[in-house]
Image (tube, helix red, strand yellow):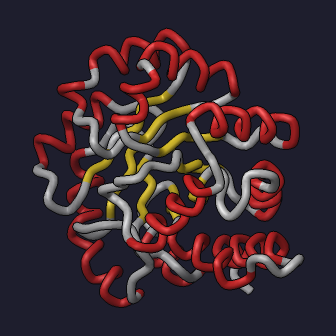
Amino acid sequence: MNIFVTAGFPEIETSAELVARLADAGADLIELGMPFSDPLADGPTIQYSSQVAIENGVKMDTTFDIVRDIRKKSEVPLVLMGYINPILHYGTTEFVEQAADAGVDGLILPDVPPEEAEELHQQCEKHGLHLIYLIAPNTSDSRMQFIDAQSSGFIYCVSVTGVTGARDGESVAESVKRFIDRVKTNVKRNPVMIGFGIKTHQDAMDISERVEGFVVGSAVINTIREHYPNPSWIDKTSEFVHNLKWGK
């Protein structure tokens, strides 16, 4: 189970504690969003969390500091998810060096096609970071095979075409079946995790039955929004994540 949260949302001070608690609740991997003003693959929920984090003052170095704080509390695998513009502004080499030094295990950059990622690939290989690519229902069979060859860590399968966001369970299940058939035919090198639209334990079980794991983001952010700033908001979010994996 891969859980997405945005670095510095809903506040910087508790980001590391939140991640550690989610790992304790059953998250096998944490996808930590790097706030960006134009997150093109993200729907309104994650856009909101990114905007709040930016207003909280989160910058790239803040994200690295949060990762370092997480590493004092947890060894859960951490993948940074974000977009290429802030990385180019920061400097690709410096970014990868700092990410690895902080304790990051991999990167997901939805707006970077593998054909344009040679420098990034080289730096990630040098510093031991996985570079994880996405495939979607409109990805051709041949391109699935190409992306599988270029990725390491796992393949992120977008279950439906479009931006992130929790969706109706039945529509997700119907859209996924034929897609998973193609994925299992074409992706042989990497484990497969599937996301976009999962909001309940049953969704997770239905959608991930034939793959190695599932990703939940918007439903987690919505849970935080529902309970924050109540003092029990981390407890409630942890409970939600526990229930996603194990059911009630």
Q: Quadrant of residue 193?
A: bottom left
* Rendered view: 56 above or below 108: below
Q: Quadrant of the C terminus?
A: bottom right
Q: Position of residue 107 (x, y in %)?
A: 47, 35
Residue at horizontal 40 percent and vertical 38 percent from the top: 132
Q: Position of residue 176 (x, y in %)?
A: 29, 72
Q: Is residue 210 above or below residue 7?
A: below
Based on the displayed image, in which of its 4 quarters is residue 137 positioned?
A: bottom left
Kindly identify the residue that appears in the image at 73 percent across and 43 percent down: 76
Left or right placement of residue 103 versus residue 154 in this view? right
Q: Is residue 87 above or below residue 58?
A: above
**What's the residue at 46%, 69% (across, down)?**
209
Residue 52 in which image quadrant? bottom right
Give the image location of residue 101, x and y in percent: 67, 19
Vertical relation: 151 (above or below) 183: above
Quadrant of the frame with the N terminus: bottom right
Q: Is residue 1 visible?
A: no
**Could you tell me how many numbered marks the image carries?**
0
Please say whether residue 158 is visible from this viewpoint.
Answer: yes
Left or right position of 195 against 118: right
123 with respect to 162 (left or right): right
Left or right of residue 4: residue 185: left
Which residue corresponds to the image point at 59% horizontal and 48% vertical from the top-left? Answer: 32
